[in-house]
Image (spheres, helix red, strand yellow):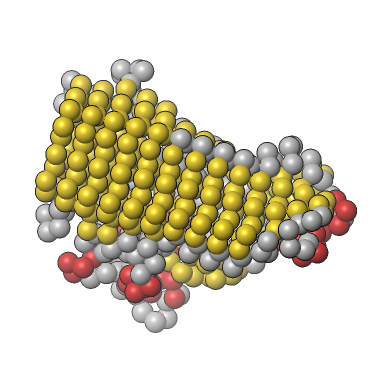
Amino acid sequence: MATLKVTDFDAVPDGATLSTRAIQRAIDSASAGDTVLIPAGRFLTGSLFLKSNLTLELADDAVLLGSQHLADYPRIPTRVAGIDMVWPAAILNVNHCHNVTVCGRGTIEGQGAVWWHKFWGDDENSGMLADYSQRGLRWVVDYDCERPRNLVVYESASVTLDSFTSRESGFWNIHLCYSKRVVLQGLRVQNSAGPSTDGIDIDSSQQVRVEGCTVSCNDDNICVKAGRGAEAQRLAKSARNIVIRHCTLLKGSGITLGSETSGGIENVLIEHNRFSGTGVGFRIKSARNRGGWIRHITVRHLTLEDVCYPFMMQLNWFPQYSYSEQSVGREQPPHWQKLAEGVDGEAGLTQVDNIRISHITSRLTQPAAFSRAFFIEGTAERPIEALYFNDVSVQAQEFGKIAGVNKLVFERVTVDAPAVTLSENDIYQR
């Protein structure tokens, strides 16, 4: 078992010389059991593709610096926000592999600002977002605006991601899709801003453990997904047997299940996590055209400080994004057609049942900060079934709203919420 340094293959650690080919040569030259080492320095790169039975180590002070040119990211089959389509590859790709480790104290740096600007312009309300929204196409702009992710694990097994930092991704930071037996431990995700810059997304994958990670981003900190629409329902690839524990969630939208639920989400354990200054604590989101299910979920032993919405469940989430506003014909791109093909009728209502939430403490260190204890909106036709809260203590401004639930059980739940619940606080679109 050898260690191959990418500088021995002519990679240049100056942050300016594009080293994609040199680093890929090192990867391609490795034999089973070898380690490819990224030493200290800043290595500018486009998409890199790992292979089976390989370790990639990011040394202390090593940085894989993502190119800011889309041409450096080849368009390949992948899944984007629940839709199977062709999109730019990530900076680091573990595709169709087994027995792969990415480790070390180094960093994957996406240089995401150029991609954020592409999406929402200088003022976060222009760019492609404004153009598409004005044309009634808010529901498709995230898919048309191609932005690289930092790391993708796709159709792979027995993968370990250990100790490195992912930061400033152009889109999602770390995306697991159609994979199994994946461990993420001791990771740090740091995104200062950016639209849809999720921290960790677990997508139609099984036997996944996320442990001891710290995530600060501008959307969902950790999210479990299972595909969007009729195609994902036909594929029936669920997200299941997932553990998220001992993580620290800072800026972001908390630990989320959905909104892509069409393949089903089940058997998820969320425990011993700490939230500080997070927009949401535990969250479920879906829409009336997703279908699928969210069931057998255990959430326990969480500590929340200054969290705006400790418990949020919305089954008609963000209509402008979730539903197409126009008819789509065969002349439109295939991914537009997939987005428009939701799960129709009653089958489109996500089944949510057997959600057990216990031993939670949510406190405000700044009592004037906004917080709503509960924001739960099921559907009248298919309410949330069997929602249990046990040993929960919440300090908030507003109590909030609970609707569309059958068999709601509170045991040893205390809430301090002196302010009136205001409808103006019903909007949270991330």
At 77% across and 63% down in the image, what residue appears?
31
Quadrant location of the C terminus in the rendered image: top left
Q: Quadrant of residue 18?
A: bottom right
In the rendered structure, the answer to whether residue 310 lies left or right of residue 23 reads: left
Residue at 28% across, 51% down: 296
Looking at the picture, how far across and down is residue 425, in whole percent?
A: 25, 35
Q: Disc count in the image? A: 0
Percent x, y of residue 253: 39, 40
Q: Quadrant of residue 187?
A: top right
Residue depicted at x 30% and y 69%: 342
Q: Position of residue 241 (x, y in %)?
A: 39, 54
Which image quarter is the N terminus in?
Answer: bottom right
The reply to whether residue 372 is in sight is: no
Determine if residue 51 is in view.
Answer: yes
Is residue 36 positioned above or below 52 on the image? above
Q: Is residue 21 left or right of residue 277?
A: right
